[in-house]
Image (cartoon, helix red, strand yellow):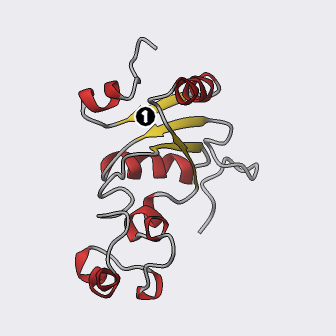
Amino acid sequence: MTSPSSGNGRLPLEGIRIVDFTVVWAGPYGTMQLADWGAEVIRVESVHHFAPQTRGLIARPPDEFAENSANQGGGYPDDLLGDRPWNRGPYFNNHGRNKRSVTLHLGTPEGQAALDRLIENSDGLIENNLPPNIEKQGVTWER
């Protein structure tokens, strides 16, 4: 199989930076496609909120959960949760590939300033949250 490049060894979306505020299925898999095609996708996550169905079902599942995870939509590597189960969930490892991640505390001026700098240096922002949820984080179209 050949690379989807334009023949010059580059992927078609190289040089494009996307800020990713997506959750659950459609958003993370959509931005995964952009990353697979070469875009630099930077996933923004909260320091206080664990996004279920995006990183996993729960941040620190009990050990028995790994043994039964194959029956719940995937499996942990070697059926072990490891020290950081939130980084080992099957959904996250699938749609999180080729992406960068950053955690920001958007309830602080420093977190908002970091987000502003990230957006200023990006080509686009993709989000699929319920309108009140993204607005509660201080992210609006007017900003």
Identity of the residue drawn at 62% across and 64% down: 2
Identity of the residue drawn at 46% across and 14% down: 143
Q: Nearer the viewer, residue 71 or 5?
A: 71
Q: Quadrant of residue 61?
A: bottom left
Identity of the residue drawn at 40% across and 47% down: 30
Q: Quadrant of residue 27?
A: top left
Across and down, in percent, residue 22 comes to 38, 42
Across and down, in percent, residue 76 comes to 41, 79
Mark 1 = which residue?
126
Q: Is residue 143 left or right of residue 100?
A: left
Q: Nearer the viewer, residue 55 or 91?
A: 55
Across and down, in percent, residue 112 comes to 52, 25
Q: Residue furthest right?
A: 8
Across and down, in percent, residue 86 comes to 44, 65
Characterize the local packing of mark 1: few (<14), some (14-19) or many (20 or more) Cα atoms within 10 angstroms: some
Q: Is residue 52 left or right of residue 1?
A: left
Q: Residue furthest top?
A: 142
Which amino acid type corresponds to the residue marked 1 in the rendered image?
Ile
Q: Is residue 72 left or right of residue 92?
A: left
Q: Nearer the viewer, residue 124 or 137?
A: 137
Q: Nearer the viewer, residue 120 or 63?
A: 63
Residue 98 vs 17, above or below: the answer is below
SS state under label 1: strand
Quadrant housing the N terminus: bottom right
Residue 45 vs 88, above or below: the answer is above
Identity of the residue drawn at 36% across and 47% down: 49
